């Protein structure tokens, strides 16, 4: 039950902040609605979020078992969102699975290094978004990919706590230059979750990690700016609910888009990127049938608990996606982690027998 407890704490904490920004604080509400949305109490979005959370919890508690063939098929289908590049990488990973090569652990150190060196190379060749604001959305795709690799490397690599702490400091600087403070969470969440769940002196580690996280928030903007972001994200979700019920609006286009947040912003007449909350994609694509996706996400979280590292990784991605929203790339990383978790568990079981 620890997965559901941790996610529930994050989920309802986020919901409270969203409602506070949209409904309880008049000053924040005025800022949130500056972008042209019709004033709303967002109660429809709140109710739908609760319904989808119940489906998520039902999936977690169901005991439903996912066969490896289903996960592999889903992994390959999701990779179509960035064809042919993502598909080729996914195809090679699947071949590795059948050859019993654990590409997740084998290349975790490389992933960690790429998450730092990749953005630096982009900054040197294209420019630094912090100093050239026009580059911000041009580099968002590669930065998200490298940040996800960093989250995986943070969890699966065998470096000591000291080395990972140094990496986290470097990670903070690199992604702060990229201007997307949400990507900083992809480094801090697995770091904090891993050591909080592993260590006996949990409160000391949690306090240290929380202090670092507060430092990131201070570097990235004020608390009020964070609340405005959360409030606006949930307002976007509310409007997606209003437009997409009962049977969906995009019918899979958000999930399989290379730029889902740009696609959502275009729906509302903007040319930027709108984050859309954890269940936003499911609602926008499938309407009320999106509860099936929510159910599946709950199953994914429970399945991840079979191994500490995979649980930390999957939980971190889901908590991160509370604000950003689910997309094909995030789901690919989650499903891929589950696939190779099964490989490791099967290998260990064979060795024991």
Image (cartoon, rainbow, N blue to C red):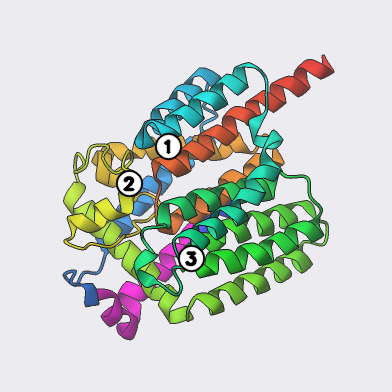
Residue 17 is inside the magenta segment = yes
Quarter location, residue 38: bottom left
Between residues 252 and 263, which one lies in front from this camera angle?
A: 263
Task: Label 1, secondary structure: give it.
Answer: helix
On the image, the x and y values in percent for residue 206 come to 71, 65
Mark 1 vs mark 2: in front:
2
Between residues 182 and 279, which one lies in front from this camera angle?
A: 182
Which residue is pictured at 66% across the width and 71% down the height?
A: 212
Which mark is first along the chain, 3 or 2?
Answer: 3
Q: Is residue 9 visible?
A: no
Q: Circle 2 is placed at which residue position? A: 281
* 3D distance between C-alphas at marks 1 and 2: 14 Å
Label number found at residue 22? none
Task: Label 3, secondary structure: give it.
Answer: loop
Judged left or right of residue 204, residue 70 is left
Mark 3 vs mark 1: in front:
3
Which mark is first along the chain, 1 or 3?
Answer: 3
On the image, the x and y values in percent for residue 122 come to 49, 57
On the image, the x and y values in percent for residue 132 come to 40, 72
Which residue is pictured at 32% across the width and 49% down the height?
A: 259
Q: Circle 1 is placed at which residue position? A: 295
Task: Label 2, secondary structure: give it.
Answer: helix
Between residues 41 and 224, which one lies in front from this camera angle?
A: 224
Judged left or right of residue 263, residue 187 is right
Which residue is pictured at 58% across the width and 47% down the height?
A: 149
Q: Circle 3 is placed at which residue position? A: 178
Q: How many marks?
A: 3
Magenta span: 11-33
Quarter location, residue 120: bottom right
Q: Main secondary structure of the magenta part?
A: helix
């Amino acid at each position: 039950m620890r997965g559901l407890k941790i996610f529930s704490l994050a989920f309802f904490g986020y919901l409270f902040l969203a409602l506070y920004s949209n409904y309880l604080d008049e000053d924040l509400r005025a800022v949130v609605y500056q972008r042209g949305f019709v004033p709303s109490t967002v109660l429809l979005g709140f109710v739908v979020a609760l319904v989808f959370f119940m489906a998520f919890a039902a999936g977690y508690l169901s005991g439903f078992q996912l066969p490896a063939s289903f996960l592999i098929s889903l992994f390959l289908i999701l990779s179509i969102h960035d064809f042919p590049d993502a598909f080729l990488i996914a195809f090679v990973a699947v071949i590795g699975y059948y050859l019993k090569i654990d590409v997740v652990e084998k290349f975790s150190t490389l992933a960690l290094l790429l998450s730092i060196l990749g953005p630096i190379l982009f900054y040197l060749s294209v420019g630094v978004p912090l100093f050239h604001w026009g580059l911000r959305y041009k580099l968002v795709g590669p930065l998200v990919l490298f940040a996800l690799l960093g989250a995986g490397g943070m969890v699966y690599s065998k470096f000591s706590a000291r080395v990972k702490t140094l990496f986290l400091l470097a990670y903070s600087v690199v992604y702060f230059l990229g201007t997307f403070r949400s990507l900083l969470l992809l480094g801090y969440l697995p770091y904090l979750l891993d050591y909080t769940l592993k260590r006996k002196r949990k409160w000391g580690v949690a306090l240290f990690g929380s202090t670092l996280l507060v430092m990131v928030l201070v570097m990235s903007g004020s608390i009020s700016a964070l609340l405005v972001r959360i409030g606006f994200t949930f307002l976007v979700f509310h409007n997606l609910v209003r437009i997409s019920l009962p049977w969906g609006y995009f019918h899979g286009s958000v999930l399989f888009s290379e730029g889902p947040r740009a696609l959502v912003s275009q729906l509302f007449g903007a040319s930027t990127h709108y984050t859309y909350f954890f269940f936003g994609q499911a609602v926008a694509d499938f309407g009320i049938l999106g509860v099936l996706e929510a159910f599946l996400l709950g199953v994914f979280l429970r399945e991840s608990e079979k191994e500490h590292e995979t649980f930390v990784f999957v939980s971190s991605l889901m908590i991160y996606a509370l604000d950003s929203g689910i997309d094909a790339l995030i789901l690919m990383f989650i499903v891929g982690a589950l696939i190779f978790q099964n490989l490791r568990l099967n290998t260990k079981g064979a060795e024991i027998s």
